[in-house]
Image (spheres, rainbow, N blue to C red):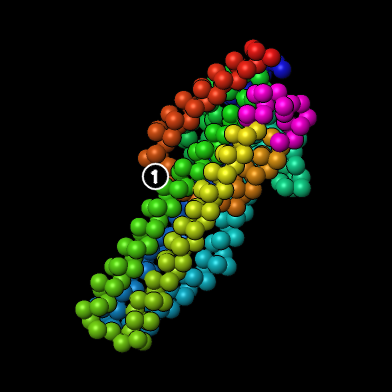
Amino acid sequence: MTTSPVGLAAQNSEKSIELVAASTKAYGIAKRVWGLQLALAILVGIAGPVVAVQFPDLKVWSAVAGLVVLLLDTFLLEGLIQGHRAAGAKMQELFDTSLYGLPWNELVATVKPLPEEVVRLSNAARSDGSDWTRYKDWYPPVAATTALPLGVLVCQRSNASWDSSLRREFSFALTAVLFLVVGVGLVVGLPHHWSYEQWLLSLAVPVTPLAIRIWRDRTANERVSVDSGRLRDRLASVWKRALDGSLQGDALACEERLIQDDLYRRRSTSPFVPNWFYKVRRARHESDMNVTAEKLVAEANESVASL
């Protein structure tokens, strides 16, 4: 087993940085549409009860607004999100497989992204004035200081661990927001002794798009968090067998390809976490990730030396 620059050199090449920038840009577009979804749902969800209290004659129109937002979300915005999220996932997959030396799996990721699309999105990221250094050292550089197959596992584990903890925390936050939305609606409506029709038109219909949005994202993030935790456990098993020599060569590469397929599926289908939430927790999570990577690499190098 020979040492290969998994994270230190290859991931900081111009080609690699362009892929990361393009992927980030595609995800960024999808996140902006997702943000519009959320903003419309919040606007209608909050404005509906308020309009019903202040302008009772307009309560039917607040209900209509709620239905329009729900239809817009379902038939237009969700499609835009899925398209750009899939593009971002493919470019991230191309970045990973290029670094890891793994084959592209067309059965899972279909065709590779077009070079023109990568150039277009990376140029868009550059024209936005993005700090290009943010795309460097995407994975812990220490992963480059051990044998390539083991370095790949370190990078894959960083992905799974980061995703699991971040989504678990965001799921808790969404649960709190959902209870807050329902609570505010009840506080607004109860003092006015609304009839069933008033509750339906003034609160239930306007708030439904927001409640569905929050519940859908909460449930999806919780599911992804659990699945990422299971993948992390699987990686621990593969790691143990790779170190004791019972899993090597093509068998190890096959395991890494299966793990990569799992990561790709999550990237292409998982709900988003807002940038502000990500940034608040980024420093702590990155610190934990780098410390863990250093420990794993030290363990790997010790094991390789003893073989």
Residue linked to disc 1 = 276
Residue 50 horizontal/vertical position (percent): 28, 73
Residue 238 horizontal/vertical position (percent): 65, 33
Q: With respect to residue 46, does 262 lie above or below?
A: above
Q: With respect to residue 191, does 45 lie above or below?
A: above
Q: Quarter of the image holding residue 60? A: bottom left
At x 44% / y 30%, what residue is drawn?
A: 288
Q: Quadrant of the C terminus?
A: top right
Q: SS class of the residue under badge 1?
A: helix
At x 51% / y 22%, what residue is drawn?
A: 295
Relative to residue 121, is residue 103 drawn left or right?
A: right
Q: Is residue 253 magenta?
A: yes
Which residue occupies the extreme top position in the image?
305
Q: Is residue 80 visible?
A: yes
At x 46% / y 42%, what residue is drawn?
A: 165
Residue 114 horizontal/vertical position (percent): 71, 42
Callout count = 1
Relative to residue 56, is residue 267 drawn left or right?
A: right
Amino acid beneath label 1: Trp
Q: Is residue 117 visible?
A: no
The secondary structure that dominates the magenta segment is helix
Q: Which segment is the magenta one? A: 239-255
Q: Is residue 199 magenta?
A: no
At x 39% / y 44%, what residue is drawn?
A: 276
Which residue occupies the extreme left position in the image?
191
Relative to residue 232, is residue 200 drawn left or right?
A: left
Q: With respect to residue 284, does 68 lie above or below?
A: below
Q: Quadrant of the N terminus?
A: top right
Residue 51 horizontal/vertical position (percent): 30, 76
Which residue is at the front of the view, 129 or 268?
268
Q: Quarter of the image holding residue 300? A: top right
- Quick one: label 1, few (<14), some, or many (20+) residues within 10 Å? few
